[in-house]
Amino acid sequence: GYITDYFADEAVSAIEANRNRSFFLYLTFNAPHTPLQASRADYDALSGIQDHTSRVYGAMLVALDRGVGRVMQALRDQGIDDNTLVFFVSDNGGAWYVGQPGLNAPFRGWKSTFFEGGIRSPFFARWPGHLPSGARIAGPATHMDIFPTAAAVAGAPAQPQTDGVNLLPY
C-alpha cells in the first residue's frame, strides 16, 4: 500500500487500543517528503493539474490530509477528541530539489537555509476546552516546545535541562 495511508492505519489502531488510558502518539507522516510518489487514485483525482511534478506533490498532500482526517476522526469515534492535545507541525520549509519553484512563497529560502522559507513552517495545537480556538502565540514556537508542553499537560514537573518551553501559558 501507500505508506502515508499505512501510517494513518497504524495510528488509528493505536488510538483504538489505548482509548481507555493516557497515551502519547508520535506520528510522522512521510508526505510530502521526497521521493515524490503518490497513489494512482490520488494522482488521478487531480487531473486538472497538468504539470506532473505539481500533480504528484498535490496528490501527496491529498493523502496527508486524508491521513490527518482519519486520525482526528478516530479520536472523535473513541470519544477522546476533547481530552486529547494534538500538535500538527512540519519540520522545515519546502526543499529546493522537489521541482516546485514557488513552494515557500512569499518567503525566500528553502529547507536547510535560515531564511523564512527554510524555517517557517506550520505549528498548530488543538485541545478543545483547554486552548482557545483561533488563538495565536506572538513569538515563535518550535518542536522543542512539544515535550515541555506535553509534560505539563501530563502533570510532570518541569525539567530545567530541557530545551523548549511549555506553551500552555501563551
Image (spheres, grey):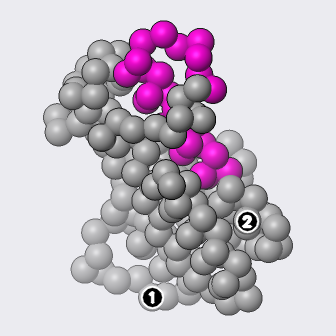
Q: Distance between the residues labelled 2 and 1?
A: 30 Å
Q: Which secondary structure class fits the magenta region best?
A: helix
Would residue 54 be found to the left or right of residue 128 on screen? left
Residue 7 placement (x, y as % from top left): 51, 62
Q: Which of 13 and 145 is in front in this view?
A: 13
Q: Which of 65 and 149 is in front in this view?
A: 65
Q: What residue type is labelled 2?
A: Ala
Q: In this view, does 93 lie above or below 166?
A: above
Q: In this view, does 104 lie above or below 143?
A: above
Residue 67 placement (x, y as % from top left): 60, 52
Which is more N-terminal, label 1 or label 2?
2
Q: Residue at x 56, y 43 (%)?
A: 63
Using a 10 Å C-alpha cutoff, classify the residue at mark 1 as few (fewer than 14 neighbours), some (14 to 19) or many (20 or more): few
Q: Which amino acid does label 1 sit on?
A: Pro
Q: Is mark 2 on a helix, strand or loop?
A: helix
Residue 163 placement (x, y as % from top left): 28, 69
